[in-house]
Amino acid sequence: MAHIVVTRPQGKGEELVARLEKQGHKTSLCPVLRIDYLATPEQQLATLNEADIAVFVSQDAVYGLHKLLPKLANNIKFFAVGDTTAQTIKSLFNTKAIVPKQQDSEGLVALAQLQQVESKNVVLVKGRGGRTVIAKTLKQRGAFVNAVAVYERVALLPDSEQWLSEWHANDVDALVVTSNSAIDAIFNCQNNQLLEWLKSRHFYIVSDRTRGHLESLGVDKDNITVAAGASNEAIAVSINCEQETSMSEQPEQASVSANDSETAVEKPVVTTQASPSQPNAPQKISKVGLLALLVALGVGAGTGYLYWQKYLQDQNAAQQESAAIAQIQELQSANQALQEQLATLNAAQQRQQQQSQQWQQQFDDEITRQLSANQRSMIAHVEQSIAASKDNSQPPLDMNEVRRLVSLADFKIWSENNYSGAASVLQRLDALLASYAGNAQLRRAIHTDLQMLASVEVADVEAIVLTLHGLGNQVDKLSFNMVDLPDDVEPSTDDALSADVSDWRANLGRTWDQLVDDFIKVRKRQAAIEPLLDDEQQRLIKQRIHFNLDQAGFAATHQYVDLYQQALQSASDLITRYYDLSDTQTAQFLSQLKQLQLKPLTPSQPISLATVTALEES
């Protein structure tokens, strides 16, 4: 069997080594990396409070975040690169994560749930460096991506020559490597002979991304096997399949050798029988018997070896079949859960439709009732007018008209929030009652309500909508909070000493500066400085502010107080986080948003008309 070295970090390779040894492989455990968990700044962790999606790239990312935040918001959707990471999320955060079928970065971004992520807050929980495919792809789809680095992989040795020398001496045939960081640590060697030997070894890896990295280092693609996942079971299955394929030709070679040996033995036997008079014939016959015995033993050993290989193949096939059955059961469970969610959504939709139909029916009944009351009132009023024109006397007070006006005023307050319209209706009712005696109590209630309605302070919705429209036109003119680097200033090089004795102080200072320059060197940074926000992120932030302002205008028009306050607060948070608050225009913009939040859309106390109570008591 081949000698296999498992290079997974300490604490992660023991189970794989035990599994491989149980299956008959010769294995060694040699961790090349250690995992150091980082003290992530609070500013990065705060992005999880507003996250819509959290993506975990490894099992260590889950452990690292759990050390910092043992509990996360319930509304976050969790995504994991592999099954092991998803199981760790379930264990620590008690939440089920979505896992792609192709368990790598490319498979994750290909998920249907991550296609429409525009304007969503995505937090990528990962190690320091690496996994740029996920962040870049989600940014291109319009998401706000924040990376939270909670750990880093550190090589246990500064170079790999010691490892390679030991592996070369122990005739290592293959290596299990599960990350690009481990690849870099293993290939960090200056000995070209050891590197060439390393490139000829077989590598068992867990992703196509690592395959590309190995091929870029000069490893032949035939020496690379990609497992179906990062779990110990998937890696063990790939090793067994590869070993069985590579060893399947050995029994055939053994059979050929055995046949050749038998042929070689038969020739001396024929020669011996043809010369019975030779004195050494008995010795030759005994050697032939010994060779025949050895050949028989070799054939028996080959048969036993073939039987053992067949037994291993049957065992591996049974394990693969069990794994396939487990996957089918998991898919069936997931399908059942989706069907239950779909049934719940259908039931909720039916309830909403029923509620909507009931509300529409109630509204239609109320309108019909009011129209019928108005028609009856108009008919009665016309009849009274006709009777009055006949006898030229004042008609009696129409109480139905009084009740209709009181109901209309109450309807304008509770349904339309139209306080001025309600006051107009009450003034009209007061003018009607002024022509009749005996209505003093009802008129006092009317005047009480008129005074109360005059004191109600509500915001001018039209003015608010116009103000929000004006603010929306100023968004593109605001300045983002960017870093302004000062221009480089070339230092003065006037360090020549003066020949004048009176300049001894200046000469002493120049000599001291030259002495300091010999010990301290200042090097300029030549690399380009990347912006805090690229153009695409700036566009998305502006688009989101426009959306919040439009949402606030809609809420103000329809008297949705909670939505109005929430939209203005979201716009204020974006301005505070991403824009330069020292800029005058930005400060004025933020101040206007705060003033709009203080304007009430509805009265602080509910309003009840005293006229309604007085009419019921009369």
Image: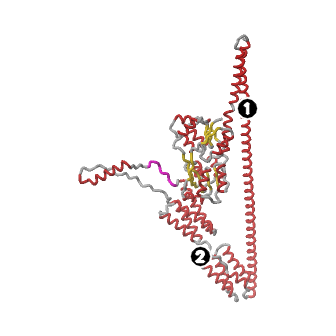
Find residue 340 and report its horizontal and vertical position in percent.
Answer: 74, 56
Q: CA distance from mark 1 to mark 2?
A: 98 Å
The residue tagged 1 is: 304
Q: Is residue 119 visible?
A: no
Q: Is residue 440 visible?
A: yes
In the figure, is residue 605 to the left or right of 518? right
Residue 578 in the image: above or below residue 109:
below
Q: Which of 166 and 504 lies nearest the eye of the viewer?
A: 166
Neighbour tally class for label 2: few under 14, some 14-19, many 20 plus, Cα within 10 Å: some
Point out the residue furthest to the top here: 277
Q: Is residue 42 magenta?
A: no
The color scheme shown is: secondary structure
Q: Give the amino acid type for the residue marked by disc 1 in the picture.
A: Gly
SS at mark 2 in the image:
loop
SS at mark 1 in the image:
helix
Q: Which of 176 and 336 lies nearest the eye of the viewer?
A: 176
The disc, 1 or 2, on the residue closer to the chain's N-terminal end is 1
Which one is closest to the eye, mark 1 or mark 2?
1
The residue tagged 2 is: 457
Residue under the point 40% across and 52% down? 488
Find residue 71 and report its horizontal and vertical position in percent.
Answer: 62, 59
Predominant secondary structure, magenta span: loop
Q: Which of 450 and 180 lies nearest the eye of the viewer?
A: 180
Find residue 280 and report its horizontal and vertical position in percent.
Answer: 69, 14
Q: Which residues are magenta?
A: 525-532
Find residue 483 and report its horizontal and vertical position in percent.
Answer: 47, 56
Residue under the point 68% across and 77% down? 410
Residue 19, disc: none
In the figure, is residue 521 to the left or right of 468? left
| On-image quarter of the N terminus | top right
Residue under the point 59% across and 76% down? 457
